[in-house]
Image (tube, rainbow, N blue to C red):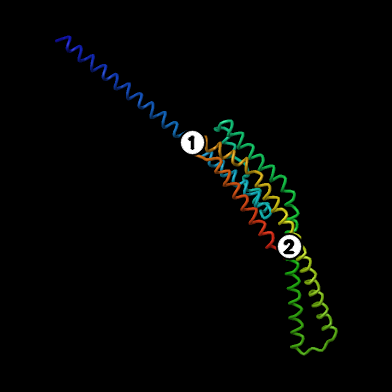
Amino acid sequence: MQNLISDVVLGASIGSFITIVGMWLANRYQLKSKKEDREHSLKSGIYLAAAEQLVTSKLMIMKLPNISQQEMESSSAQGVATAKLTIVAENSTVQAVTELSAAIAQAILALVPEKLPLDNLRTDIQILSSQLDGNFQKQNQMLNEMTAYNLRGDSDPRLWKALQDNFDHYSSQIDHIVKSRDAKYTELNRAMKELFVKCMEASISLSELEVKAITCIRNELNMPFNESEYRKTIEANNSKMEAEFSKFLVRVPDAA
């Protein structure tokens, strides 16, 4: 009887031990799984933010001819997101993203000096437009005074001549400013078209580095990805963009 009790107690003890060990292993697996899920979620957020930032920076190249200085200063071309990626990513991904980021920055730095003349032309046009508004106001003022002169029935030839001379002066100024502004617009349009071509060429030249970086990111996230198909899509989009842009250049005249 005592042996039977001992066997039952021993069996229960072993069963309890096995249960405890099983629960411990299950909890350990769950904790490990949750940790891996958290790490994967954290890395996914960093990778997606970095990819978005790289795409935004690349798009800025195409927007360069029209983007304002304030927008350039407020835009985080390659900032925190790509810096975080270098901490958690594999060496191959870090290298691919760094190469693309550096190439984008280099392209922008090379194109910015060619954007400055466009900004100067826009400033000149704004100044001329302001001068034009002022002369139109003066011309209207003279016209109103000439109308009032006639309504009063005045017969002062010197006053009439002064009004007429002032009206002619402002009319002449208006003609001169309009011609100057039109010439600036023509110069601006021509320069913008030339810069757009260079921006498009710079953007297309980054395609191979973009494919490499996106491939590395998707591989780390264990996301199925057909690199060759993606490359074909990029090439097709680039060809379409070049064709549409050629049509755009033909349709848009240099003159304002």
- Looking at the image, which residue is at 54% across and 37% down? 217
Note whether 2 is above or below 203 in the view shown.
above
**Residue with the mark numbered 1:** 222
Could you say where residue 192 lies in the image, as x and y percent from the top left? 71, 56
Note whether 235 is above or below 185 in the view shown.
above
Query: Could you tell me how far apart the alpha carbons at marks 1 and 2 are, in whole angstroms?
Result: 50 Å
> Which mark identifies residue 254?
2
> Which mark identifies residue 245?
none
- Looking at the image, which residue is at 79% across and 88% down? 154
In the picture, measured across the screen, residue 35 lies left or right of residue 99, that is left
Label count reads: 2
The quadrant of the image that shows the N terminus is top left
Residue 19 placement: quadrant? top left
Element type at mark 1: loop
| Pick the front one: 232 or 213 | 232
Could you say where residue 148 lies in the image, as x and y percent from the top left? 74, 84
Element type at mark 2: loop
Note whether 26 is above or below 102 in the view shown.
above
The quadrant of the image that shows the C terminus is bottom right
| Pick the front one: 254 or 247 | 247
Note whether 210 is above or below 115 in the view shown.
above
Identity of the amino acid at label 1? Asn
Q: Residues within 10 Å of mark 1 (few under 14, many from 20)?
A: few
